[in-house]
Image (spheres, helix red, strand yellow):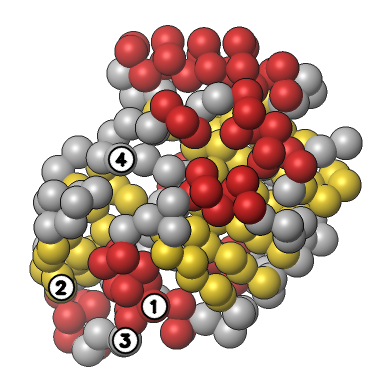
Amino acid sequence: MKQPIWKRFLSYFFEIAIEASSTDLNPDLQLGLKKGRYCLSTPNAIYSYGDLYDNFTSSFHKIKIGESPIKDVLILGFGLGSIPFMLEKKFHKKCRYVGVEADEVIAYWAAKYLTNEMASPVQIVVADALLFVKTCQQKFDLIAMDIFLDSHIPEQFETPVFLKKLKSLLNNNGLLMFNRLSLLKEDREQSTAFFENTFLKIFPEGYCLDVGGNWMLIGENR
């Protein structure tokens, strides 16, 4: 659903509230219009922000995603669909997207406000990402792991078993992008431990991109 031009104009001066909701997963969920983009947030985190979702925007630039022949993309923690939106609008990639989102309200807002503005096919699956990954048979060229509950990643998504399953869902030379917090000292310590003790054991040639307040861990299925 497109917003009126006057609302988009005013959103460059102050955020305009669009909707709010309380769910079991997200007790305080806000959808606003900010700088002409939909912004999905909780009191402690931004879940989606169009092509200004900087941790992925910056990472896509650094890995030169525009030159990559990706076709099938899986997004775990779909939010409003910032990742497919920026890939199509900013990097000119037309792919087939599967987005997994556990919160029904967020999935509904994504379909209502964003994905219908895209030319690329987008399938939104309302499901627990752990169960989806365990049962998925499809292969992907790119998997974006972007699951947060407020400002933390649930521990079930940090296990070697989960990472091994993600790797098995990648095509040859497929990429995993795993979004981590690094803003606070505690965040950096936890992300460092996960990267060194877990991630590199599954993706030995993996590396980390510092994208300002977040680290993007990159693994490839070779």
Q: Amino acid at mark 4?
A: Leu
Question: Quick check: 18 left or right of 177?
Answer: left
Kindly state the secondary structure of the residue where label 1 is placed: helix
Residue 157 x/y as whole percent: 49, 33
- Counting residues from the start of the chain, the first of labels 3 and 4 encountered is 3
Residue 30 x/y as whole percent: 16, 59
Quadrant of res 70: bottom right
Residue holding disc 2: 18
- Counting residues from the start of the chain, the first of labels 3 and 1 encountered is 3
Quadrant of the rendering where the C terminus is positioned: top right
Residue holding disc 4: 149
Residue 49 x/y as whole percent: 35, 58
Q: Is residue 35 visible?
A: no
- Mark-to-mark CA distance, 3 and 1: 9 Å
Q: Residue at x 39, y 32 (%)?
A: 153
Depth check: give the residue in front, 81 or 212. Answer: 81
